[in-house]
Image (cartoon, rainbow, N blue to C red):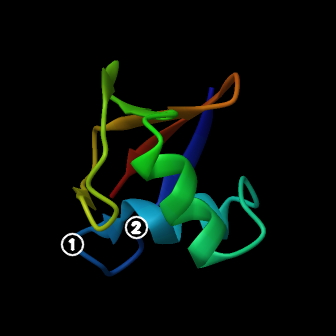
Amino acid sequence: MATFSLGKHPHVELCDLLKLEGWSESGAQAKIVIADGLVRVDGEIETRKRCKIVAGQTVSFAGQSITVIA
């Protein structure tokens, strides 16, 4: 499974993660797919665009999954 490293940051916002992973072309597009209920965090639908994703959580979208690591 793919991983995303937070580096020195305590969290990453969900909309930014989708953009950084290339799962959406822009932050605006990321916010739309999140609002439409197409993104899951730890298996649950997440509609908060700026939800803080921390190490240990898994984000899934469009058949892809990524686990966030510290």
Where disc 1 sits, the SS reads: loop
Tell which of 38 and 12 is nearer to you. Answer: 38
Task: Kindly indicate the quadrant of the structure image that contains residue 3.
Answer: top right
| Quarter occupied by the C terminus | bottom left
In x, y percent, where is residue 22?
Answer: 76, 61
Left or right for 42, reference 67? left
Tell which of 11 and 15 is nearer to you. Answer: 15
What residue type is disc 2 on? Leu
- For label 2, count other residues whose C-alpha is less than 10 Å away and answer few (under 14), some (14-19) or many (20+): some
In x, y percent, where is residue 4?
Answer: 53, 54
Numbered circle sitting on residue 27: none
Q: Going 26% across and 68% down the picture, which residue do you hit?
A: 11
Contact? badges 2 and 1 (CB < 8 Å): yes
- How many numbered marks does the figure carry? 2
In x, y percent, where is residue 34?
Answer: 45, 49
Left or right for 24, reference 51? right
Left or right for 14, reference 9? right
In x, y percent, where is residue 2?
Answer: 64, 36
- For label 1, count other residues whose C-alpha is less than 10 Å away and answer few (under 14), some (14-19) or many (20+): few
Numbered circle sitting on residue 10: 1
Q: In the displayed structure, would residue 34 be above or below residue 39?
A: below
Q: Residue furthest bottom?
A: 8
Q: Going 30% across and 39% down the picture, which residue do you hit?
A: 46
Numbered circle sitting on residue 6: 2
Left or right for 67, reference 57? right
Q: Going 65% across and 65% down the picture, which residue do you hit?
A: 29
| Quarter occupied by the N terminus | top right
Where disc 2 sits, the SS reads: loop
3D distance between C-alphas at marks 2 and 1: 7 Å
